[in-house]
């Protein structure tokens, strides 16, 4: 078997097997990636050590380097290739592992903490397979010996399997435990109370650790809206639809669906002064991915780590999954989504609605079952925005179908297709509507205005009531409680703009 790493000195290559010899399972690339990550960041050693266990590296040189890394980290000393070169030279192991050039070559292979843990799992799994293969070979050899005792061999095999099971469980404790935590820290320390990525605590459009999906028919402005959020994440603007957007470190944009058109859409709001930020903090992947996310669930997290991105935009979902209608593939995609989220990567997804609902009336409220594909696609999303309108129409309606906190909208918005911006129609803002109602509003009054006239349903009235209650909580409205029905017919609770609200906007 030829050594897959020609840069390693030839005298350290594994021996060539005979033609009929089974090639032992191994993944040298994963071994190199883990060692390189540990050289860059010694804290990664603590993350991968429980996953790896003992004696898992296939290449003896890698096991020697790993032992040196463990020693350096245990003594709280640096783990960079320069220091390791000195340590291994003092031990007399430097030339055995490939010398100074090979250590620096390993240091150039760096994916990050999240990827290192996945790579460590690969290494451990290959080592487990090699042990099982060695055990099987020993069993075959014992069974071929003259006078072999079947019962004795069976007992030995069972004892070996029990020992292997216990060893595998012990070495796999990192895999079993590293995402488990006690109940208090789960409730209080997982970021449940963190500031939203887009919106406010009361009305969150995009919550940290949860994906945001923007859905709509072609031409209604999904990309226009998404690009504004991206540019806000890059720090080129502060708000989108009058709601704040938190900054990001680096955005990876997966331009899989018509990348030229995506580039033209972005160009509408890019200025010469933006060049430095776009070169340093925005990475664009053009065209199809190396594999669909349902087939390689780690690919999304690996892409983020490879490009040092904390935000990924998937444009669009149909290009990232083999098929959208198969429940099992949808669950596989959700696993890919969750693995990236678990690694601290925020995800924005662009998706399409079902064709049969594309021509629904503009004011009609859509439902989650109008999103194309398996229901598991939306079930795993943290927030779902649905844009209704006609293709190319600058005036569309934004519905918030799945909410992390309070629902926004429906919002009548207007796209400026020349500048690539979107603005909110103030006539549908509950605060503005209340301010302009001298006689106040009931929840039913507000609901009728928000749905564009007609008789609002109970859900519409309850949503309007929540809007008004938030205005009261914010000091922008007062509430006059109604009276129950009876012979006089009762009276609905009415809300009025507060003096503070009138003064602030007057």
Image (spheres, rainbow, N blue to C red):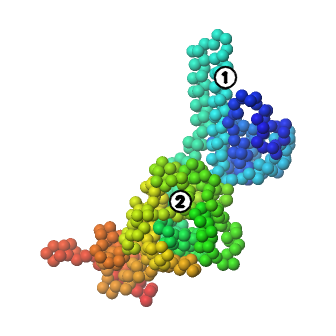
Q: Earlier in the sequence, mark 1 or mark 2?
A: 1
Does residue 443 sit above or below 94 in this rendering? below
Pick the front one: 227 or 502:
227
Q: Residue at x 64, y 62 (%)?
A: 286
Q: Residue at x 67, y 11 (%)?
A: 146
Distance from label 1 to label 2 (Cα)?
A: 49 Å
Locate the C terminus and report the quarter of the image it occupies: bottom left
Q: Position of residue 409 (x, y in %)?
A: 42, 72
- Secondary element at tag 1: helix
Foreground label between 1 and 2: 2
Q: Quadrant of residue 365?
A: bottom left
- Spot the residue most to the bottom: 506
Locate the N terminus and report the quarter of the image it occupies: top right
The residue that mark 2 highlights is 317
Residue 389 seen in the figure: yes
Q: Residues within 10 Å of mark 1 (few under 14, many from 20)?
A: few
Q: Residues within 10 Å of mark 2 (few under 14, many from 20)?
A: many
The residue that mark 1 highlights is 138
Q: Quadrant of residue 90?
A: top right
Residue 38 seen in the figure: no
Q: Residue at x 46, y 50 (%)?
A: 327
- Spot the residue most to the top: 147
- Secondary element at tag 2: helix
Q: Position of residue 240 (x, y in %)?
A: 53, 74
Does residue 369 sit above or below 239 in this rendering? above
In the displayed structure, does residue 21 sit left or right of residue 151? Answer: right
Q: Position of residue 285 (x, y in %)?
A: 64, 62
Pick the front one: 51 or 320:
320
Say if mark 1 contacts mark 2, CB within 8 Å.
Answer: no
Q: Position of residue 450 (x, y in %)?
A: 36, 76
In the displayed structure, does residue 125 sit left or right of residue 206? Answer: right
Q: Residue at x 57, y 80 (%)?
A: 418
């Amino acid at each position: 078997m030829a050594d897959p790493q020609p840069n390693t000195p030839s005298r350290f290559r594994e021996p060539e097997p005979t033609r009929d010899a089974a090639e032992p399972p191994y993944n040298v690339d994963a071994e190199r990636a883990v060692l390189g990550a540990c050289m860059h960041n010694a804290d990664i050693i603590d993350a991968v050590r429980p996953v790896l266990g003992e004696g898992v590296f296939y290449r003896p040189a890698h096991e020697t380097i790993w032992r040196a890394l463990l020693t350096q980290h245990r003594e709280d000393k640096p783990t960079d290739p320069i220091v390791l070169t000195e340590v291994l030279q003092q031990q007399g192991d430097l030339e055995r592992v490939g010398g100074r050039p090979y250590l620096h070559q390993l240091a150039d292979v760096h994916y990050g903490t999240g990827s290192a843990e996945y790579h460590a799992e690969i290494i451990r799994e290959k080592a487990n397979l090699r042990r099982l293969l060695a055990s099987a070979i020993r069993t075959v050899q014992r069974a071929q010996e003259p006078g072999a005792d079947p019962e004795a061999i069976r007992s030995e095999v069972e004892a070996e399997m029990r020992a292997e099971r216990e060893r595998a469980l012990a070495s796999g404790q990192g895999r079993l435990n590293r995402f488990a935590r006690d109940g208090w820290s789960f409730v209080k320390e997982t970021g449940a109370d963190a500031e939203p990525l887009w919106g406010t605590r009361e009305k969150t459009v995009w919550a940290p650790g949860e994906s945001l999906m923007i859905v709509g028919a072609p031409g209604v402005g999904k990309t226009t809206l998404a690009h504004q959020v991206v540019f806000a994440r890059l720090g080129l603007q502060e708000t989108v639809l009058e709601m704040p957007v938190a900054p990001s470190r680096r955005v990876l944009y997966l331009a899989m669906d018509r990348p030229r058109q995506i580039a033209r859409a972005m160009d509408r709001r890019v200025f010469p002064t933006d060049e430095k930020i776009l070169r340093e903090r925005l990475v664009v992947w053009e065209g199809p991915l190396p594999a669909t996310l349902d087939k390689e669930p780690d690919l999304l997290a690996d892409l983020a780590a490879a490009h040092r991105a904390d935000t990924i935009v998937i444009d669009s979902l149909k290009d990232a999954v083999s098929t959208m209608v198969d429940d099992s593939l949808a669950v596989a995609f959700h696993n890919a989504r969750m693995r990236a989220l678990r690694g601290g990567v925020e995800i924005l997804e662009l998706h399409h609605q079902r064709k049969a609902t594309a021509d629904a009336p503009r004011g009609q409220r859509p439902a989650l079952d109008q999103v194309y594909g398996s229901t598991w696609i939306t079930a795993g999303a943290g927030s779902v925005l649905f844009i209704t309108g006609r293709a190319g129409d600058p005036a569309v309606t934004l519905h918030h179908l799945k909410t992390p906190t309070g629902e926004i909208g429906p919002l009548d918005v207007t796209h400026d297709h020349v500048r690539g911006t979107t603005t909110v129609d103030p006539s549908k803002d509950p605060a503005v509507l209340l301010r302009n109602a001298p006689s106040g509003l009931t929840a039913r009054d507000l609901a009728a205005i928000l749905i564009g006239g007609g008789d609002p349903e109970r859900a519409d009235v309850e949503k309007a009531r929540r809007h008004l209650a938030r205005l009261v909580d914010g000091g922008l409205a007062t509430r006059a409680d109604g009276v129950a029905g009876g012979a006089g017919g009762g009276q609905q609770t009415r809300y009025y703009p507060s003096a503070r609200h009138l003064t602030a906007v007057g």
